[in-house]
Every structure is written in structure tokens, then in C-alpha cells.
Image (spheres, grey):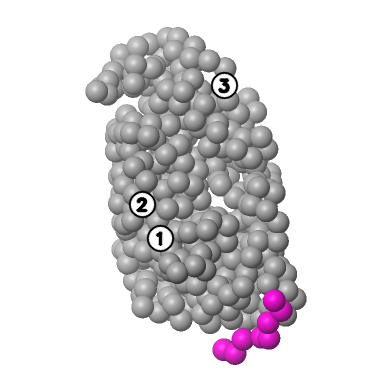
């Protein structure tokens, strides 16, 4: 039985979350190397709410219990997503600030402001024609694969997955290659923690250029539908919706594809050559979204005032981060049945969940990207044992630094 949120404590009241135990850093190389071991220990030693540091000197609470997470995500009144009150007290120069700071878009706002941005985003995404996606992926995948197929080895993360996802997203958004390359550089810098001012300026200039282009030369794409939406988005608002689309449309699908490939290339259930057929890409994706989602810890909220949940007081205006990875592996919910994936939190839950029209797009993009690669290079295998792959440190993503593979050199494919 979950305790109900309770309010009324004074703002300077002691918060028992501080008294549970020492804060656990979730940004270190050690954490990235074995996050699931850390989640199990958190669950054992701390329970559903864990005092953490999301960056050195930046305290937060990590939610590791599925039902607690769903409750928080569906209670925007007590757990709003607007970080402005927290930002006033947070160090402005932390490298992760572009990932968490206030932006006038659907992710970082609450109430009427959020509803306006969310409505525009949903309407713009609803125009994506999923029937054209497979051809779009194939037309992008073949020339990309041809850049390395004769070499016999590659880092498919940087040489295939990232350029493919970015190419397809840019087509859907109506973003030309030169602007896309500027956004790609800024996007990578954002996830890798380059300084806030540089990232925002680089990203803002490129996306302002894209906005101006679509205002003067509209087309059948997501950016044009946003520009023309009756919400009447300003240039600054357009830039921030596009920041969100690029951030959500590149890094998570890239990680999902790469991490699923690792499982498919290392798990006998997917590599089987005996009498049984190996399991499908769809089966692998369903499982990966549940056991190791590409955004491991995110969906940040900021309680307006001290609040009691799960018998723990959380302080006002301090980040509460949902660990989708820990919650999806909560023994109370994870039965080992992954088909259909209606329950997992990889796409979040509640009013800030991934828009309904974006989910099938991301899923089909990942499925087709994997199938295209394995069809082109069917003898693809990992170049190093799975245990030697290196994971990028950072509080939010579950991301490899590289995915080295080997395969028999193959002639270029025909478009």
C-alpha cells in the first residue's frame, strides 16, 4: 500500500531522504560499467527512493520502484516538470545543464504552457507517414553501409547507427544536410556535457535557420507543421520544440539500436544455427526496451513543496529522477514476459510521456535499421567479447562509446 502524498511541512523541515544513507553518484565510469548491479544494491539498501548525486555536488532523488514511478509521473500537480525554481539554486555551469534546464517546450513546462506545446507537437508528429519509413531507412542505410562494407570491420555505432538515425530524422523534420550537421555536433556535445553556453548557441543558431527556412518555404514535414500550427509558436518556441525533437529523436534511438545489436550478436537465442529459428528483431527490441532502456534515468520532476511519499520526505524544488532501467527491472513488475511491452517505462508515462505518434516511429526505425544491417552483412559479429565493450558515463543515458564489429568483406550494395 503506497502512502499518499502529504503536504504541510515547513520548507526548512529536515528531509529524511538525506538520512537514508550516503548519496550514490550516477555519473561515474564505475556506475556506467555496472548500473544494474548498482540498482539492485539501491533497492536492497535504500528501497524505492534513493539519495543520489546526478552530478558532483548536485543532489537528487532516484526512483527505483515501478509503481512509485508511475504514481509520480501521473501526478503533475505535486511533481511538475518545470525546473525554474531549482535552477535558481543550481550551479549554472554544470555540463549537464542543457539536458535539464528550463526550456519553453513540451518537456520542461507544466500546466497550460505544457498543454499548448504538447498539442502542437502531437499534431505535427501525427502527420508522419509510417508507410514511407522502411523505404526511407533503406535509402539511407545502403549508401552508409557501402562506406565500410568492403573493409571487413567497422564501428557500427559511429559509422552506421548514428548517421542513419540522423539522416532519417532530418528527412522527417525537413532539415537539410548542412543544418543537420550543425545540429548533430551540438546534439552530441549536449549529451557529452560540453559547456552550456556553447551548446545552446550552436543548437539555437542552426534551428533558428531551419525555422526561418520553413516559414518562407513550407513543405510536408514536421517542422513546417509546427511552424504553421494554430498555437502560433514564436521563433524561440520553435527552436526549443526542435531541440526536444532532435534530443529525443537521435540519442535514444541510437542507443536502442546499438544496445539491441549487442544482445542479438551475443545471445544464443538470437544467433542460434541449430534446428530452432533465432528470435526476431522485434523480440529483441521488446526485451531491450524493458531490461535496458536507452534513456536509463530521466523524466525529471521538481516537487513544489516538501512531500511525503513511500514514508520518505522529499524536499521542495530538488530533482526527482525516474530510473526507467531500475523500475522496469523491479521484481514486483518484471515477469520476464516482454512481448508487446505495454507496461515498460522506456517511453515514460503520464502527461510528459513520449507522444503516441513518436513511439511507433522510433520502434520501426530501430527495427528496420537493424534488419537492414543484418541483411546486408549477415555474418556480422562482435569484434570483442561483450564484456569488453565500454559504456559512456553520464547520469541519464545507457550508451556505448563504440560498437566494433567484424564481417567478411562484402561488395557495395545497389540502391
Residue 69 position within the rendered picture, expressed as x and y whole percent measured from the top left: 36, 35
The residue identified by callout 1 is: 283
Say whether marks 2 and 1 touch (CB < 8 Å): yes
Q: Is residue 257 left or right of residue 116?
A: right
- In the rendered structure, find residue 338 and report the number of the disc placed on it: 2
The residue identified by callout 3 is: 23
Q: Is residue 91 above or below residue 412?
A: above
Residue 100 position within the rendered picture, expressed as x and y whole percent measured from the top left: 52, 40
Residue 278 position within the rendered picture, expressed as x and y whole percent measured from the top left: 46, 66
Determine the secondary structure under disc 1: helix
Cα–Cα span, label 1 and label 3 = 36 Å
Classify 10 Å Cα crowding around label 1: few (below 14), some (14-19), many (20 and above): some
Magenta span: 408-415
Q: Residue at x 48, y 78 (%)?
A: 136
Determine the secondary structure under disc 3: loop
- 325 or 297, nearer to the observer: 325
Q: Is residue 390 left or right of residue 271?
A: right
Cα–Cα span, label 2 and label 1 = 8 Å
Q: Residue at x 31, y 44 (%)?
A: 350
Q: Residue at x 55, y 31 (%)?
A: 38
Quarter of the rendering occupied by the C terminus: bottom right
* Mark in the foreground, 1 or 3: 1
Amino acid at each position: 500500500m503506497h502512502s499518499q502524498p502529504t503536504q504541510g511541512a515547513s520548507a526548512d523541515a529536515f528531509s529524511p531522504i538525506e538520512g537514508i544513507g550516503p548519496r550514490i553518484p550516477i555519473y561515474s565510469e564505475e556506475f556506467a560499467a555496472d548500473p544494474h548491479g548498482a540498482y539492485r544494491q539501491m533497492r536492497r539498501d535504500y528501497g524505492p527512493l534513493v539519495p543520489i548525486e546526478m552530478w558532483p555536488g548536485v543532489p537528487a532523488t532516484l526512483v527505483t520502484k515501478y509503481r512509485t514511478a508511475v504514481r509520480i509521473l501521473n501526478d503533475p500537480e505535486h511533481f511538475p516538470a518545470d525546473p525554474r525554481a531549482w535552477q535558481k539554486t543550481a550551479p549554472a555551469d554544470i555540463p549537464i545543464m542543457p539536458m535539464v534546464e528550463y526550456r519553453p517546450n513540451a518537456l520542461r513546462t507544466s500546466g497550460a504552457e505544457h498543454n499548448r506545446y504538447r498539442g502542437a507537437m502531437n499534431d505535427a508528429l501525427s502527420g508522419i507517414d509510417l508507410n514511407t519509413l522502411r523505404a526511407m531507412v533503406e535509402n539511407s542505410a545502403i549508401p552508409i553501409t557501402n562506406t565500410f562494407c568492403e573493409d571487413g570491420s567497422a564501428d557500427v555505432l559511429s559509422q552506421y547507427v548514428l548517421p542513419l538515425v540522423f539522416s532519417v530524422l532530418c528527412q522527417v523534420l525537413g532539415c537539410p544536410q548542412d543544418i543537420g550537421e550543425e545540429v548533430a555536433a551540438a546534439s552530441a556535445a549536449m549529451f557529452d556535457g560540453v559547456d552550456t553556453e556553447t551548446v545552446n548557441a550552436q543548437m539555437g543558431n542552426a534551428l533558428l535557420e531551419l525555422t526561418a527556412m520553413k516559414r518562407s518555404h513550407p513543405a510536408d514535414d514536421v517542422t513546417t507543421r509546427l511552424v504553421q500550427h494554430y498555437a502560433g509558436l514564436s521563433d524561440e518556441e520553435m527552436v526549443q520544440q526542435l531541440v526536444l525533437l532532435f534530443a529525443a529523436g537521435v540519442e535514444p534511438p541510437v542507443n536502442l539500436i546499438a544496445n539491441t545489436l549487442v544482445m542479438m550478436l551475443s545471445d544464443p537465442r538470437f544467433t542460434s544455427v541449430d534446428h530452432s529459428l533465432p528470435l526476431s528483431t522485434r523480440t529483441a527490441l521488446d526485451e531491450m526496451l524493458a531490461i535496458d532502456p536507452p534513456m536509463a534515468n530521466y523524466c525529471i520532476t521538481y516537487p513544489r513543496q516538501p512531500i511525503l511519499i513511500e514514508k520518505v520526505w522529499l524536499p521542495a524544488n530538488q530533482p526527482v529522477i525516474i530510473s526507467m532501467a531500475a523500475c522496469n527491472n523491479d521484481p514486483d513488475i518484471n515477469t520476464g514476459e516482454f512481448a508487446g511491452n505495454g507496461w515498460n517505462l522506456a517511453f515514460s508515462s503520464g502527461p510528459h510521456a513520449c507522444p503516441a505518434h513518436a513511439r511507433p516511429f522510433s520502434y520501426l526505425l530501430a527495427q528496420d535499421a537493424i534488419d537492414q544491417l543484418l541483411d546486408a552483412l549477415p555474418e556480422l559479429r562482435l569484434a570483442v567479447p561483450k564484456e569488453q565493450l565500454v559504456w559512456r558515463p553520464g547520469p541519464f543515458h545507457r550508451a556505448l562509446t563504440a560498437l566494433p564489429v567484424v564481417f567478411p568483406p562484402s561488395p557495395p550494395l545497389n540502391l
